[in-house]
Amino acid sequence: MRQFAWPALAVFFAATATSAMDQRLVRQFEKLDPETRLEQRCDTEAMEQISADKSVYRPDKVIAYTFADPIMEDNAMKAPGAVFRSKGEWYRLKFKCSTGPDHIEVLSFKYKIGDIVPHDEWERHYLYP
């Protein structure tokens, strides 16, 4: 399992992410290495897109690698085994995300929400309430 080295940053992203990128958020992204920036920018986009849809979900965390490692390319990633947390529950998620070369501007994003992750699977996949 990969360890996310910036847990406080993820909370910051969730709290400050808007459809128009806040300059504080951009500065935080710029501090990350390119691969981590791509992953975190796409995770943030997933939260924004799911929140913006007229749905019951209110995501506060996305993890791109819970059920499968993301497939990284120069300016894109596929996350076939992602999850997101909404209102204390975890849901499976698949997404495809492409960015500009700086990994700040999202050029395209598609996602599909899957089933709820049963509570008895949380510990095995390092999920938490």
Image (tube, rainbow, N blue to C red):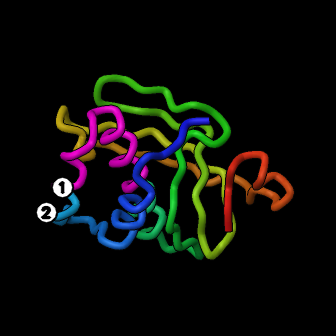
Q: Residue at x 29, y 30 (%)?
A: 75
Q: Amino acid at mark 2?
A: Gln
Q: Can residue 39 be found in the magenta stretch? A: yes
Magenta stretch holds residue 31: yes
Q: Quadrant of residue 2?
A: top right
Tell me whether circle 2 and circle 1 mark residues in contact (CB < 8 Å): yes
What is the three-letter code of the residue carrying label 1? Val
Quarter that holds the C terminus: bottom right
For disc 2, the marked residue is: 23
Question: Which residue occupies the foreground of this view, 64 or 58?
Answer: 64
* Range of magenta residues: 27-45
Find residue 1 and report its horizontal and vertical position in percent.
Answer: 62, 35
Say which quarter of the image contains residue 9.
bottom left
Q: Which residue is mark 1?
A: 26
For label 1, the SS is helix
Between marks 2 and 1, how big is the CA–CA gap? Answer: 5 Å
Q: Residue at x 72, y 46 (%)?
A: 125
State left or right for residue 127 relative to residue 10: right
Percent x, y of residue 12 = 34, 66
* Most common secondary structure along the magenta stretch: helix
| Badge 1 density bin: few <14, some 14–19, many ≥20, Cα 10 Å | some
Q: Position of residue 94 (x, y in %)?
A: 57, 43
Q: What is the secondary structure assignment of the residue under circle 2?
A: helix
Rendered position, 26 above or below 12: above
Residue found at the far right of this picture = 120
Identify the disc placed on residue 8: none
**50 sits to left or right of 90:** left
